[in-house]
Image (cartoon, rainbow, N blue to C red):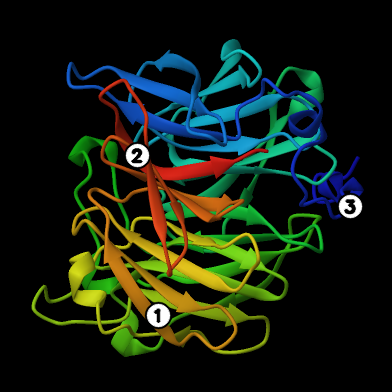
């Protein structure tokens, strides 16, 4: 099969995995976490906040990619990690482990093709430098079969869209593992949002205006034709800029300010849409605050304080957000706290699987 056509067998499939609906014991969410002793874990949580499993991993994790038809999640290492763990989500058992090739590291995110055949992982080819997407064959034990250009520097999150294609948040920040997490190109950084066809070909790329060039595009969520974007400002720390943007194909990026943006301390941790699609939430783990927007208009909705608010995902009550000591369920109008024992410190993502 032609190396640029192997993704074209996918068809749109964005619903919850069939196995999650069939298995009452399966977790509703997967998230990365750590404990005070420095140990790092992947944790499965039920819709009620009950811990289903906790699996130790060799370094700090970030997000997970979920297979559309098998009870498998790929727990990705946080930049500049080089490991990914394939897990059985019903019990937290390890199936296999992936390692990034020489000269690469993972960025903490991945996405499956709609048919579940291939996994795409965001990677840094740090000596080039160039953003790449690793391609792994899930039917061949996750053998690495190819890689593709991400369309920019620092590809962070990748999501699959309703048409079977993909959207990549190229954060624009050049890094190298020899310099740990130091940002090496701030004077010249250029983030972008790149769209790929289901065959892996770059269809469109949009950059921010010059005034927003230092607003790194990090995390994304999609609803219909609209992509919502969480931003992290790398410019003057005294300057206040929007930390949420939206985009539709063929248009410019639209930035949406909020009177409480300052509370996030120029760092948006996660972004998610409520289960009914009406609200967007942006978390601020550094500021212990979350802000809300009307998904249709982008208008701000009053936020609230939530200690160490990190990952966010749709939930039956609107949204679920990982916070200090547990989960917060609700929306802009109300919220309830559910404790999760274990003294966990959550990473920035809560991935919904049920």
State yes or no: discs 1 and 3 in contact (Cβ < 8 Å).
Answer: no
- Quadrant in which the N terminus is drawn: top right
**Residue, x 78% and y 34% (percent of image)?**
21
**Closer to the observer: label 2 or label 3?**
2
Nearer to me, 336 or 267: 336
Image vertical order of residue 303 relative to residue 127, above or below: below
State the mark number for residue 11: 3
Relative horizontal placement of residue 209, taking residue 116 as reference (left or right) = left
Task: Check disc 2 and report the residue beneath it.
Answer: 347
Nearer to me, 54 or 216: 54
| Mark 3 surroundings: few (<14), some (14-19) or many (≥20) residues within 10 A | some
**Closer to the observer: label 2 or label 1?**
1
State the mark number for residue 301: 1
**Residue, x 22% and y 50% (percent of image)?**
307
| Mark 2 surroundings: few (<14), some (14-19) or many (≥20) residues within 10 A | many
Residue most toward the left? 238
Q: CA distance from mark 1 to mark 3?
A: 36 Å
Q: Position of residue 136 (x, y in %)?
A: 69, 31
Q: CA distance from mark 2 to mark 1?
A: 25 Å
Callout count = 3
| Mark 1 surroundings: few (<14), some (14-19) or many (≥20) residues within 10 A | some
The earlier-in-sequence mark between 2 and 1 is 1
Relative horizontal placement of residue 101, taking residue 284 as reference (left or right) = right
Q: CA distance from mark 2 to mark 3?
A: 31 Å
- Quadrant in which the C terminus is drawn: top right
Image vertical order of residue 312 relative to residue 280, above or below: above
Q: SS of the residue at dot 3? A: loop
Q: Position of residue 257 (x, y in %)?
A: 34, 85
The earlier-in-sequence mark between 2 and 3 is 3
């Amino acid at each position: 099969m032609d190396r640029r056509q192997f993704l074209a067998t996918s068809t749109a499939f964005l619903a919850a995995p069939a196995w999650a609906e069939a298995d009452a014991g399966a977790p509703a969410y997967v998230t990365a976490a750590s404990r005070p002793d420095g140990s790092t874990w992947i944790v499965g949580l039920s819709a009620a906040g009950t811990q289903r499993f906790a699996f130790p991993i060799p370094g700090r994790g970030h997000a997970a990619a979920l297979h559309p038809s098998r009870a498998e999640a790929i727990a990705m290492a946080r930049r500049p990690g080089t490991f990914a763990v394939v897990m059985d989500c019903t019990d937290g058992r390890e199936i296999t482990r992936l390692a990034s090739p020489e000269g690469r590291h993972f960025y903490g995110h991945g996405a499956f093709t709609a048919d579940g055949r291939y996994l795409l992982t965001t990677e840094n080819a740090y000596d080039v430098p160039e953003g790449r997407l690793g391609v792994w064959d899930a039917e061949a034990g996750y053998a690495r079969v190819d890689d593709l250009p991400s369309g920019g520097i620092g590809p962070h999150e990748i999501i699959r869209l309703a048409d079977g294609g993909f959207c990549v948040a190229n954060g624009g920040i050049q890094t190298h593992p020899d310099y740990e997490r130091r940002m090496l190109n701030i004077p010249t950084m250029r983030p972008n949002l790149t769209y790929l066809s289901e065959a892996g070909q770059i269809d469109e790329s949009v950059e921010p205006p010059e005034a927003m060039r230092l607003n790194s595009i990090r995390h994304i969520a999609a609803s219909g034709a609209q992509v919502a974007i969480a931003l992290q400002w790398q410019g003057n720390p005294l300057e206040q800029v929007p930390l949420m943007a939206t985009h539709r194909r063929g248009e410019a990026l639209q930035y949406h300010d909020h009177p409480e943006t300052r509370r996030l301390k120029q760092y948006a941790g996660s972004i998610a849409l409520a289960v009914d699609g009406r609200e967007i939430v942006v978390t601020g783990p550094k500021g212990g605050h979350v802000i809300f927007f009307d998904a249709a208009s982008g208008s701000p909705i009053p936020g609230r304080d939530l200690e160490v608010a990190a990952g966010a995902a749709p939930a039956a009550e609107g949204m679920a957000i990982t916070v200090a000591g547990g989960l917060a369920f609700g929306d802009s109008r109300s919220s309830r706290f559910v404790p999760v024992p274990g003294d966990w410190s959550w990473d920035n993502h809560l991935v919904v699987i049920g």
